Amino acid sequence: MKPSLEDTLLAAIRTIPDYPRPGILFRDITTLLGNARAFRRAIDELVHPYAGQKIDKIAGIEARGFILGGAIAHQLSAGFVPIRKKGKLPYETVRVAYSLEYGLDEMEMHKDGVSPGEKVILVDDLIATGGTAEAAVKLLRQIGADILAACFVIDLPDLGGREKLEALGVPVRTLIGFEGH
């Protein structure tokens, strides 16, 4: 019998306790990325709802969103747009500031990365509090993107990130959820 998607992904994701600080359970997808079967199943499941639709761009949030987003863009025959930390892109950028637990950060993308009206899916590995994904949605909308969805492998539902994005009118797709963080 073929293992369920949830079983496959749970077996492939490593949990590291007390990282980056005590009390946090870090969900590490590098082990999923190194497992060909789990990686393929995750990408196939993230792509499936959008197969056959006209998707112009996949926007991936640095850094694991680049890996997942690149694979998804390939499968959907879409372009890929990196959303990076401030100062990492060589051309003219648009930028948004957002709150972190201990201060502010900024992310940016090339100002010509998405044209107004293009259909975009936002991708990252995990949604927790939603602050980074919310900022990415605002950044994409600032240049006129039509955000069809935000996709993540992992949801930490008790931290409320999904609700933040849905409140912005962005449908959220996740593959597995972990209670606690």
Image (cartoon, rainbow, N blue to C red):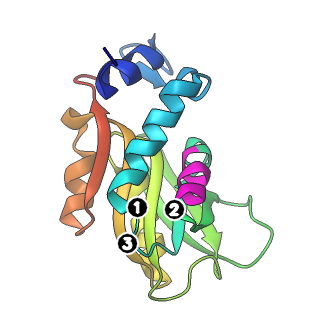
Find the magenta span and give its range: 68-76
Q: Residue at left 29%, top 23%?
A: 4
Front disc: 3 or 2? 2
**Front residue of this view, candidates 89 and 177:** 177
Labels 3 and 1 touching (C-beta < 8 A): no
Above or below — where is 15 with respect to 78?
above
For the N terminus, the quadrant is top left
Residue at x-position 33% and y-position 28%: 5
Q: Amino acid at mark 3?
A: Ile
Query: Label 1 amino acid?
Result: Ala
Give the residue at mark 2: 76
Q: Is residue 141 visible?
A: yes
Label 2 Cα crowd, 10 Å radius (few <14 / some 14-19 / many 20+): many
Q: Which image quarter is the C terminus in?
A: top left
User: Can you say whether 76 is above or below 177 in the image?
Assistant: below
**SS of the residue at dot 2?**
helix
- The amino acid at mark 2 is Leu
The earlier-in-sequence mark between 3 and 2 is 2
Residue 65: percent from left, percent from top: 55, 47
Left or right? Give the position of 161 relative to 61: left
The quarter of the picture where residue 126 lies is top left
Q: Check residue 112 in the rendering and tell me which mark sits there, or answer none.
A: none
Q: Is residue 131 visible?
A: no
How crowded pointer 3 is (Cα within 10 Å; few <14, some 14-19, many 20+) is rated as many
Magenta span contains residue 151: no
- State left or right for residue 116 relative to residue 88: left
In terms of depth relative to the viewer, which is nearer, 47 or 161?
47
Which residue is pictured at 22% across the width and 24% down the height?
Answer: 179
On the image, numbered disc 3 is attached to which residue? 147
Q: Position of residue 111 (x, y in %)?
A: 64, 80
